[in-house]
Amino acid sequence: MSNPYRILGLVLCLAGAVLTPLFYFLVGSQPLTAVSISSIMLGFTSLAISNARPYISPEACQMLLATGTENIAALLEELGLRNRAVYLPSSMQNGFMRAIIPFVEGDIPFDSQHKLPRRLIVRYGKNSDSVAIAVTTPGNVCVKMLDTIPGPTASDIESALTYILTGMLDIADSISMKETGSNIEVEVRGVKMHEDNAWYYQCIGSPVASIAAAITSEALGKPVQIKEENSSKADKRERIVLEVKD
Amino acid sequence: MRIYNRLIIYLALAFSVVNSVLAFAGQRDVQVYFILDLMAYLIITLLYVYLNPRARGALTAVNAVFFTGFGVIVVLKIINIIKP
């Protein structure tokens, strides 16, 4: 009963149900009757929206997120890894989605024929130094929330990102996307989530960047790396440049 | 502002505008108020395509109930017209 939308909905519906016959039959005012009918409509909308509230509290979600983040950050710090993660599509990993953090920096070609095993330490190329650790990121989890995988066009990916960031998670106001060669520039406005674990986010990217990279990778069926990430807390904007790797 | 708060605020504003304009225009038929409120409601809720699937499903059910009300009004009007 602590759900504010449910309380608002019940109050508006009850008030509307009591006032409608009162205004129509006793007062005889059509405009006031219309206002009470509008109150019922608004009440039903509020009751419908109350379904979207999660069953567990945001504090409990934050606790689970912090646990996962700190465990991976500890692992990265222990291994001394500071390279940026490469987001791989499920087609390169036997159906599941993860990002890999290479041990060695630089452009190492991916072996597209070789599917990555479901292990922590994986070999992703033919070279002897193409070894990485594979981790599940916020973006990889979000891809599972999509009903269908978006098409490879920028507008399809933009729609999928808007659905996840604005509709499902409600952590941004709007998203725009621009394709320039092998790079994809994403601008997110009204970002409500800011990072605090520097090491973790340097490798994986911020939650918003991680989601953008994972969805883009799955849509294009190619590895994607977060090349650049600039955020402005004052403007609540985040600019992300994604590099599509072949 | 959360997307759900925005939806409720826009609906409240739309209802206020529609009801005020009709009241100032001297409209005396409550069915006209309901139909115009319903149109504003359907337009605004349809614009929110990116809502959570659970909320979207519940809103679709609410839309269906209101639309049934609209259907009943239309049927009553038709009966009134064709009644000898």
Image (tube, helix red, strand yellow):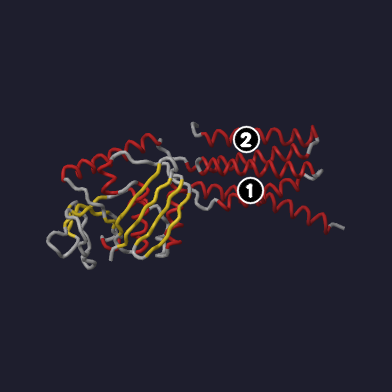
**Residue B41, label in figure:** 1
- For this orientation, the residue located farthest to the bottom is A113
- For this orientation, the residue located farthest to the left is A128
Q: Toward which corner of the image does residue A161 lie, by quadrant? A: bottom left
Give the number of callouts.
2
Q: Which chain is home to disc 1?
A: B
- Crowd class of label 2 (few under 14; some 14 to 19; many from 20; radius 10 Å): many
Amino acid found under the numbered disc labelled 1? Tyr
Please name whichever residue, B26 or B66, is drawn nearer the observer in this view of the structure.
B26
Q: Which chain is home to disc 2?
A: A
Please name whichever residue, A135 or A9, is drawn nearer the observer in this view of the structure.
A135
Query: Residue B40, image x and y in percent?
Result: 66, 49
Q: Toward which corner of the image does residue A97 lie, by quadrant? A: bottom left
Query: Residue A8, image x and y in percent?
Result: 57, 34
Q: Is A77 rendered above or below residue A19?
A: below
- Crowd class of label 1 (few under 14; some 14 to 19; many from 20; radius 10 Å): many
Q: Is A126 rendered above or below residue A169?
A: below
The residue under the point 38% across, 45% down is A231
Q: Is A79 rendered above or below residue A86?
A: above
Q: Could you tell me if the residues under marks 1 and 2 are in contact, i.e. CB atoms within 8 Å?
A: no
Q: Is residue B63 left or right of residue A195?
A: right
Query: Residue B61, image x and y in percent?
Result: 57, 49
- Judging by the rendered image, the residue that carries numbered circle 2 is A12
Instruction: For marks 1 and 2, give the one nearer the viewer.
Output: 1
The residue under the point 60% across, 44% down is B10
**Residue B25, label in figure:** none
Gap between marks 1 and 2, in whole Å?
16 Å
Q: Is residue A43 left or right of residue A96?
A: right
Query: Residue A35, image x and y in percent?
Result: 70, 38
